[in-house]
Image (cartoon, rainbow, N blue to C red):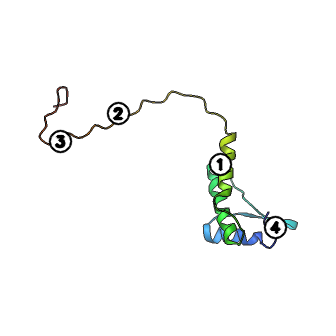
């Protein structure tokens, strides 16, 4: 829902023309009073964060008083706190730390490739 004095159609228009983000409109009695984030096909939480960020920018451009990142942060907090715990798994070993280069003129130590 958009606040009184803001037309949801303007948010939709700005989102599309400025950010290439397609938002849905409110229908019938809700026309101009809201916009919707919809999707066709696969959509996961990380993809939706981009849609929320674009909607925030469009809302601000349309005159709404919104702190950029507030919706994204709220979604991140929610998803992180409700995500299922991952089972522990054995990780591959770490690569060895890089060794400093030998100064010029020093001979390689025993066991080094010749």
Q: Position of residue 76 (x, y in %)?
A: 65, 48
Circle 4 residue? 33
Q: State which tag comes first along the sequence, 1 or 4.
A: 4
Question: Nearest the camera: 35 or 78?
Answer: 78
Q: State which tag comes first along the sequence, 2 or 4.
A: 4
Marks 1 and 2 sit apart, C-alpha to C-alpha, by: 34 Å
**Which element type, helix, strand or loop, lies under badge 4?**
loop
Mark whose residue sits in front, 1 or 4: 1
Circle 3 residue? 103
Identity of the residue drawn at 62% across and 49% down:
46
Q: State which tag comes first along the sequence, 3 or 1.
A: 1
Relative horizontal placement of residue 35, taking residue 88 as reference (left or right): right
**Location of residue 114 by image quarter:** top left
Is residue 42 in view? no
Mark 4: give few (<14), some (14-19) or many (20+) Cα within 10 Å.
some
Q: Position of residue 91 (x, y in %)?
A: 48, 30
Mark whose residue sits in front, 4 or 3: 3
Is residue 8 in view? yes
Q: Are marks 1 and 4 in contact (CB under 8 Å)?
A: no
Q: State which tag comes first along the sequence, 1 or 2.
A: 1
Q: Position of residue 27 (x, y in %)?
A: 83, 65
**Location of residue 55 by image quarter:** bottom right
Residue 76: assigned label: 1
Marks 2 and 4 sit apart, C-alpha to C-alpha, by: 59 Å
Mark 1: give few (<14), some (14-19) or many (20+) Cα within 10 Å.
some
């Amino acid at each position: 829902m958009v606040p009184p004095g803001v037309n949801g159609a303007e948010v939709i228009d700005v989102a599309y023309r400025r950010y290439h983000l397609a938002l849905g409109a409110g229908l019938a009695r809700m026309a101009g009073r809201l916009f919707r984030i919809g999707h066709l096909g696969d959509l996961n939480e990380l993809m939706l964060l981009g849609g929320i960020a674009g909607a925030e920018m469009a809302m601000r451009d349309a005159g709404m008083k919104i702190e950029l990142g507030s919706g994204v942060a709220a979604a991140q907090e929610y998803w992180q706190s409700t995500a299922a715990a991952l089972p522990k798994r054995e990780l591959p070993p770490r690569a060895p730390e890089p060794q400093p280069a030998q100064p010029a003129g020093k001979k390689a130590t025993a066991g080094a490739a010749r």
